Image (tube, rainbow, N blue to C red):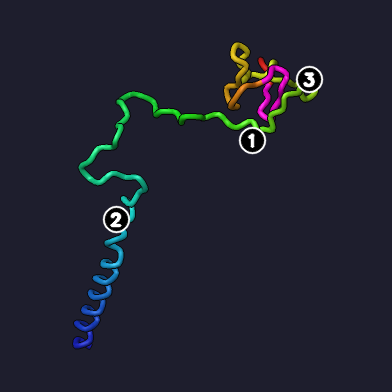
Amino acid sequence: MNAEMPARRVALRGALAVGCGLCLPLALFGCDAKKGSNPPGTTPPNPPAQGSAPAAPASSKVSQASVQYQTQPKGEQKCADCLQFIAESNTCKVVDGQISPDGWCTLWAKKA
């Protein structure tokens, strides 16, 4: 029985070494493999200023087609009475392009 113990220990140590060898690349590279990450020791092209909010996307407005915009009101609902409508410029806070005061879209919300 004592002769079997060293052989079992050798087998267990070998299995441990193989198992750790398979997990090591995952542990070292798996968590850091991010799209667009910079190599160690480099800085991003435009680092954000400390204390500033992240920059907004160039156009955060949705297209007129995606919200079923129409130039006619839907019943009593029209853009002129919508919370998102900007009357001074006939535009909308959330929909791209020129907006008719008599128009309507699925994002319509009554002014308070």
Which residue in the protein does label 3 denote? 76
Circle 2 SS class = helix
Query: In the figure, residue 61 lies in which quadrant?
Result: top right
Specify the amino acid type for callout 3: Glu
Q: Which residues are magenta?
A: 100-109
The residue depicted at 33 percent of the width and 52 percent of the height is 33
User: Which mark is on residue 56?
Assistant: none
Circle 1 SS class = helix
| Vertical arrangement, residue 32 with respect to residue 51, above or below | below
Tell me the crowding category of disc 3: few under 14, some 14 to 19, or many 20 or more residues within 10 angstroms, Cα based. few
User: Which mark is on residue 66?
Assistant: 1
Query: In the figure, residue 13 lies in which quadrant?
Result: bottom left
Left or right for 72, reference 64: right
Residue 102: within the magenta?
yes
Left or right for 71, reference 53: right
Label 1 vs 2, first from the N-terminus: 2
Question: Would you say the magenta stretch is mainly helix, strand or loop?
Answer: loop
The residue depicted at 33 percent of the width and 24 percent of the height is 51
Which residue in the protein does label 2 denote? 29
Give x and y (percent) for residue 42. Answer: 22, 41
Label 3 vs 1, first from the N-terminus: 1
